[in-house]
Image (spheres, rainbow, N blue to C red):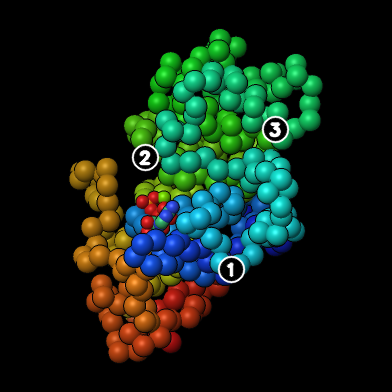
Amino acid sequence: MATANTSEAPVLKVENLRTYFRTRWGEVKAVDGVSFELRKGETLGIVGESGSGKSVTVLSMMRLIPIPPGRIVEGTITLDGEDLLQLSESEMSKVRGSKIALIIQDPMTSLNPVFTIGNQVTEAIRIHQDIPKRSVMEKALEVLRKVNIPAAETRIRDYPHQLSGGMRQRVVGAIGISCQPLVLIADEPTTSLDVTIQAQYLKLLRDLQQESGMSLIFITHDFGIVAKMCDRVAVMYAGKIVEEGSVRDIFNKPSHPYTEALLASVPKMEEDVDRLYAIEGQPPLLHDLPVGCSFADRCPYVMDRCREEYPPEFPVDEGHYSACWRLA
Ligand SMILES: Nc1ncnc2c1ncn2[C@@H]1O[C@H](COP(=O)(O)OP(=O)(O)OP(=O)(O)O)[C@@H](O)[C@H]1O
Ligand code: SF4
Ligand SMILES: [Mg+2]
C-alpha cells in the first residue's frame, strides 16, 4: 500500500458536485453531491457498480460532459487553487492535459486510427508546452521510452493498429503523462489487457507517480487493483459516495452495507474474474431515485428511517466515513 504525505493541502478538492442529464425519461442524476479530496502523490480508488457515476464524475472534472444533454448543476472543483468550473473553455483547454489528464476506458478508441502514434504524442505535447519543434519530437521519444515502448524511434512512425493492445495502452499512458499533470485519472485502464500486461502497466504507472509526485485517481471494478495501487477508496452508489476511507479500513472494516456486499461479491481466484459484482437486486433508476437511502431496496439491514431520509455521512474512524443510518 502506498503512503502519501497527508499534512499538505489537497491538490484537488471536489465539493458537492452534481451532474445531471436530460433524457426522455426525465432528469438522470448521474452525479448527485459528490465531494472528495486528493493530496500530492496520493492515489484514490473509485469503485462501484456499472452506472454508479464514476466516469461522469471524472468527465465533469475534465469538463468533458456533453452539454446538452448533460449539465453540471452545482459544485466546485478546485485544482491547484483554481475552480475549474469557473474557467472559460479556452482556459480549461490549457488545464486539460497540462494539470489534469485522463486515460480513458478503452485504449482502442482513445487513439485515432488515421494518425501515427508520433503525431498523437507530439500533438499532446505541442498543445500544452511552448517548446521548439525539434524538442517536441525529442520529448515524445522520451515519454514513449518512459512507458517502455521498445525501439521508440521506429515505433513512433507506426499507426495504432500496428501495435499490440499492451503497447497501445502504454501509448495512451504516454499521452497522459506527457505534460506532467498534477493529477492523472485512469478510468478502468486495464480491463482489456491480459493479467501480466496489466501488472506491468500498473507498476509503470506507480513508478511514474513516484518519480513525478503526481496524484492518481483510479476507477476500477477490481479490488485487487485497489489493494495494490491505492491509498484511499471512495465507494460510489447511484451517483453518491456512500463510503470513503483508507484502503486498510475499507477492506478490514467496511461499514456501509453496499461496500460489504461489493467485497463479498469479489470473485475467488478460481472463478471467472472477467466481470464481477453479482449483488442481488438492481440499483435504483437515476431519474426516479427513492426518498431516503438509495440502497434501501437491496439492503439486508433496512429500517423505517432509511426510507424517509437520505443518511448523512457519519464518521467511522479518522478519515473513514459512511453514509448509513446504522451509524447514527
Ligand atoms: N450522455 C449521457 N446521456 C444520458 N445519460 C448519461 C450520459 N452519460 C452517462 N449517463 C448516465 O449516467 C449514469 C452514470 O454513468 P457512468 O458512465 O458515470 O457510470 P460508471 O460508474 O462509469 O459505469 P461503468 O462502470 O459501467 O463505466 C448512467 O446511468 C448513465 O446512463
Ligand atoms: S441507510 Fe439503511 S438502507 Fe441505507 S445502507 Fe444503511 S441500513 Fe441500509
Ligand atoms: Mg465508467
Secondary structure of the residue carrying numbered label 1? strand
Q: Nearer the viewer, mark 1 or mark 2?
A: 1
Can the viewer see residue 136?
yes
* Mark 2, other Cα within 10 Å: few <14 / some 14–19 / many ≥20: some
Earlier-in-chain disc, 3 versus 2: 3
Three-letter code for the amino acid on which mark 3 is drawn: Ile
Three-letter code for the amino acid on which mark 1 is drawn: Glu
Q: Which residue is mark 2?
A: 191
* Residue 328 coordinates in the image, percent (x, y): 43, 87
Residue 224 drawn above or below residue 121: below
Q: Nearer the viewer, mark 3 or mark 2?
A: 3
Taking the spot 59% from the left edge, 50% from the top edge, the residue there is 62
For the view shown, which residue lies furthest in the top direction?
154
Taking the spot 42% from the left edge, 30% from the top edge, the residue there is 108
Taking the spot 49% from the left edge, 77% from the top edge, the residue there is 313
Q: Nearer the viewer, residue 291 or 169?
A: 291
Residue 139, image quadrant: top right
Q: Is mark 3 within 8 Å of ligand 1?
A: no
* Image quarter for ligand 1: bottom left
Q: CA distance from mark 1 to mark 2?
A: 32 Å
Taking the spot 55% from the left edge, 49% from the top edge, the residue there is 64
Q: Which residue is mark 3?
A: 127
Q: Nearer the viewer, residue 41 or 76?
A: 76
Earlier-in-chain disc, 3 versus 1: 1
Label 2 near label 1: C-beta < 8 Å?
no
Earlier-in-chain disc, 1 versus 2: 1
Secondary structure of the residue carrying numbered label 2? loop
* Mark 1, other Cα within 10 Å: few <14 / some 14–19 / many ≥20: some
What number is the disc on residue 256?
none
